[in-house]
Amino acid sequence: MSIASAPFLHLHTRLISQLDSLVPFLSLAHAEVYQLLDASYSMWLPVEVQSTLPDNIGVFQTQIAHAGFLLGYSYIETFVTDVITALYTQHPERLPKDKALRYHDILAIGHYDGLIIKMIERTVARLNSLERKVKHLEIMGLNVAISNELLAAHHIRHTLIHNAGIVNRSLPYHFGWQIGDRITLSVAEVNGFGIAARNFAATLIQCITDNDLTVVDEGAIHQSVVVDIDVDDYIR
């Protein structure tokens, strides 16, 4: 394994470990666990909190499924974010040429490596959704179009977080929900999204390898970054 490929393999391994950790969590969505919670532990909570507990097994299972889904989504989005950061760290010459840094930022940083880091941070910060991050990978030359499942996950996550799970617009590649419906994911559906995330991650890592983006001058990794990029392009 080369020094250059190590960050990408580490990120992939981390993601798989995170997704694996959701399996025992999702397995809690069983009647026996719900009955144990209701019979043995609900009294531990203040009276005003007890009323917020799920009052049937269906609600309990949905809560487990949604929590697992949101965790899994955060894992795959963080993975893609960190991959983009690692790509730009190894190949800063690929940074957008049409962006700018202020004089204040440049003077505050004071050295070239720091400017590269700031450029990467600014570029990645603008990618505020999984869909935008995947499209940015395509702009970088990686053929990793977002799958229907992950595109659906993007919209489902937005609906769960920002609209209490009530569908307020048409969802592409949805599972039969109409505007006004409440999204209720099952554990099996969450597992399906997890499989889609694993497949996407494996495809992305393979695509990076196929495009030789793990190949850099290993002797330069521990030296100051010197690349064919005009810092003046970032100054205004």
Image: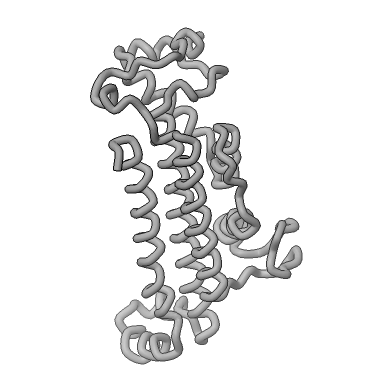
Relative to residue 112, is residue 31 depicted above or below? Answer: below
Q: Nearer the viewer, residue 84 or 44?
A: 84
Q: Position of residue 106 (x, y in %)?
A: 38, 13
- In this view, the residue in front, 140 or 5, is 5
Q: Nearer the viewer, residue 88 or 105?
A: 88
With respect to residue 219, does 64 lie above or below? Answer: below
Q: Is residue 84 above or below residue 183?
A: above
Provide residue 189's location: percent of width, then percent of height.
57, 71
Q: Residue 236, how many percent across, how many down?
A: 51, 9
Please give the name of the residue rendered at 24% of the width and 25% of the height, measured from the top-left corner. Answer: 222
Identity of the residue drawn at 43% across and 28% down: 120
User: Splitting the image into 4 quarters, where does residue 38 fall?
Assistant: bottom left
Coloring scheme used? one colour
The quarter in which the N terminus is drawn is: top left
Q: Using the image, determine if residue 186 lies above or below residue 165.
A: below
Q: Give residue 40's quadrant in the image.
A: bottom left
> Residue at 57% across / 61% down in the picture?
160
Count every numbered label the image shows and give the total: 0
Identity of the residue furthest to the left in this view? 222
Where is residue 52? Give x, y as percent. Answer: 46, 76
Q: Work out whether residue 49 or residue 160 is closer to the camera in this orientation and state it.
A: 160
Indicate left or right for 165 with 35 as reference. right
Residue appearing at x 73%, y 66% in the figure: 180
